[in-house]
Amino acid sequence: MKINLNINGVSKAFLIQENEYLLEVLRRNDYTSVKRGCDNTSCGVCTVLFDGKPIPSCSMLAIRCEGHEITTVEGIEKEAEKLANYFGELGADQCGYCNPSMALTVYSLKKENKHATDEEIKAYLVGNLCRCTGYVAQHQAIKKYLGDES
Amino acid sequence: MIFMEIGKYYAPETLEEAYNLFVESKDNKIIGGGAWVKISLKRVEKLISLDQLKLDYIQENNAYYEIGAMTNLRSVETNENIKLIYSGILNQAISNIMGVQIRNLATIGGSIMGKFAFSDLIGVLLVMDAKLEFYKLGEISIYEFLDLKKIPEDILLNIKIPKRDSKGYFKKVSKTHLDFSIINIAISKGKNFIIAVGSRPGIAQSAINTANYLNSQTNFTEEILDKACDIAIDELTFGSNLRASKEYRELLVRTYIKRGIRQVIK
Ligand SMILES: Cc1cc2nc3c(=O)[nH]c(=O)nc-3n(C[C@H](O)[C@H](O)[C@H](O)COP(=O)(O)OP(=O)(O)OC[C@H]3O[C@@H](n4cnc5c(N)ncnc54)[C@H](O)[C@@H]3O)c2cc1C
Ligand code: FES
Ligand code: FES
């Protein structure tokens, strides 16, 4: 069957099966910045924005997305690049597997709460696991990004 | 990748249609946010989505707040009015569940209908004296819902939280933020105390004798608080599992019931 999505600002039709999750459909269609980790809502690497809000695409049935706006990291390219520069400056990435999902969540945090405190940043990002960095440098980079008015 | 097998997916536009599809067969299931359905079901004959039924809302009147069953947890958590009631314990309890991603997906209806033993919400809804409105069953209290031997074959439409001038306390104890509760404790105090303890590891239970004892007191001395904790340990059942022993859970309950009472009588 076919569903229509507005993906990164472009309307597109996707062929899906009724039991497929959004993650699978996106990856099959070359949106491979959306990663698979736990497959059960625990790790956050499959994060996409669904009508602007971060959700775990591994657990959202694709069929329920008909007509909705889906954003992957490619859809927030400029903001993701800004964040990536702070990550680079502060040595906040290693393997990079968590980065696209982290960028989407941080972008959403900035929209919701630009002046987030340290605790609020931690609370908002608790669902984005990173297996490499230990989070400290990422946290500092995120703070710099939130304060960036450019 | 192995997915839950779905015979056919339906997104009916009327409640009657959704209900009829649901009760047709035990193999037909309702999907709320679907986060739990995904990891708990292998095969569903007919999967019935409630997406088209306009059950995603939060509204209020003079007597209560009404939350549509399809409202996601994050919308409840961030609702400024709901933050103001019962010292914001509903928002607090939700904000302690996993990350924002799942809270944007999982619904309040699914969180109740799952009747999860680990639930951080059910205890809070107990001390708020919440009412549940079902399509066929009508309105029942959350107490009645928990007393039912089986989860009703019905569609949960909304949750009503009475507007009361009550203070609230909530505590979740878990090994990490992403883990289930070892124990969770909710207390409210308006005219009377209501106390609930969840993840014992059984589902939230109301400590009625403890509340009755406290309701008969005027001076909350250390001795009175100790006695209240003794009653709570006596009337609630605790057990051991991988997360914690029965004895540890009892110790936590003593500590946090005391702290909670002190907080709500301030
Ligand atoms: C990995 C993981 C960790 C979690 N950790 C916690 C935690 O620490 N604390 C906590 O409190 N919760 C936790 N939860 C539970 C979560 O918060 C939700 O309660 C859960 O996902 C159910 O919500 P849902 O909308 O996804 O429901 P679904 O998965 O869609 O449905 C759950 C059940 O409810 C039924 N149902 C749904 N809506 C209705 C309705 N309106 N009428 C009738 N039946 C309905 C479904 O048929 C199904 O049986 C966790 C969930 C997951 C997946
Ligand atoms: S793959 Fe979706 S949350 Fe881990
Ligand atoms: S940098 Fe490797 S998982 Fe985060």
Image: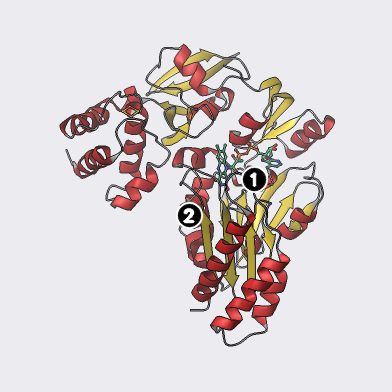
Secondary structure under tag 2 reads loop
Inspect this view and state whether residue B81 appears. Answer: no
Residue B164: percent from the left, percent from the top?
59, 71
In the image, what residue occupies the spot 60% across and 44% down? B242
- Give the camera-side residue of B256 and A85: B256
The chain holding disc 2 is: B
Residue A18: percent from the left, percent from the top?
63, 18
* Label 1 residue near ligand 1, CB within 8 Å: yes
Residue B83: percent from the left, percent from the top?
48, 61
Question: Which is more N-terminal, label 2 or label 1?
Answer: 2
The chain holding disc 1 is: B
In the image, what residue occupies the spot 64% across and 63% down? B196
Compared to residue A133, the image places residue B44 above or below, namely above
Quarter location, residue A101: top left
Q: Which mark is residue A52?
A: none
In the image, what residue occupies the spot 23% across and 38% down? A137
Q: Is residue B113 left or right of residue B96?
A: right
Q: Which mark is residue B79?
A: 2
Write down the residue under mark 1.
B109
- The mark total stands at 2
* Label 2 residue near ligand 1, CB within 8 Å: no
Question: How far is mark 1 from mark 2, CA to CA?
Answer: 17 Å
* Circle 2: residue type: Asn
The residue sitting at the bottom extreme is B219
* Circle 1: residue type: Gly
Secondary structure under tag 1 reads helix
Asked whether the residues under marks 1 and 2 belong to the same chain, the reply is: yes
